[in-house]
Image (cartoon, helix red, strand yellow):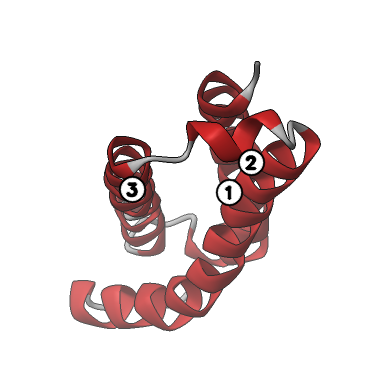
Amino acid sequence: MTDISARQALSDAIRYWEPRRILYNGVLFAVVAAVFVFHLPEARFKIDVNIVLVLFVLAVLANVAYCSCYVVDVSAQISSFRDHWLRLRLALLLVGIAFAATLTYFFAVGFFAA
């Protein structure tokens, strides 16, 4: 077991999570795009300024939700379970992406389904 400071744990968390934010956003974008394409041509007529603004707000909120990983990660890193936790971080990422993709799917279907 290695004792680290909160600053070191936060730095390690940033180094781990921020590159993976690109994957997270890419998956959510792919879900919206897939739902849009699946519901063509009707979905084209549902695009307006309000939908674009709502999608923007939801994208920002999805990234705020992504930041919740820092609370879990830093807390686990400064605990006595750090070594075990470092092997489990990928599970948090995958569960978080699956949960966010599911919510994204339901919102996208609500926006683009006929």
| Residue toward you, 25 or 88 | 25
Residue holding disc 1: 92
Q: Is residue 24 above or below residue 109?
A: below
In the image, what residue occupies the spot 36% across and 77% down?
14
Mark 2–mark 3 Cα distance, whole angstroms, equals 13 Å
Mark 1–mark 2 Cα distance, whole angstroms, equals 5 Å
Q: Is residue 100 above or below residue 111?
A: below
If you read the primary sequence from the N terminus, does the residue marked by circle 2 or circle 3 appear first?
3
Q: How many marks?
A: 3
**Marker disc for residue 95:** 2
**Marker disc for residue 52:** none
Residue 17 place in picture, x, y as percent: 46, 70
- Specify whether residue 94 is in view: yes
- Specify whether residue 3 is in view: no
Q: Residues within 10 Å of mark 1 (few under 14, many from 20)?
A: few
CB atoms at circles 2 and 3 under 8 Å apart?
Answer: no
Q: Residues within 10 Å of mark 2 (few under 14, many from 20)?
A: few
Mark 3–mark 1 Cα distance, whole angstroms, equals 11 Å
In the image, what residue occupies the spot 66% across and 50% down?
33
| Residue toward you, 48 or 91 | 48
**Marker disc for residue 68:** 3
Residue 3 place in picture, x, y as percent: 35, 75
* Element on which disc 1 rests: helix
| Residue toward you, 29 or 97 | 29
* Image quarter of the C terminus: top right
Indicate the amino acid at tag 1: Leu
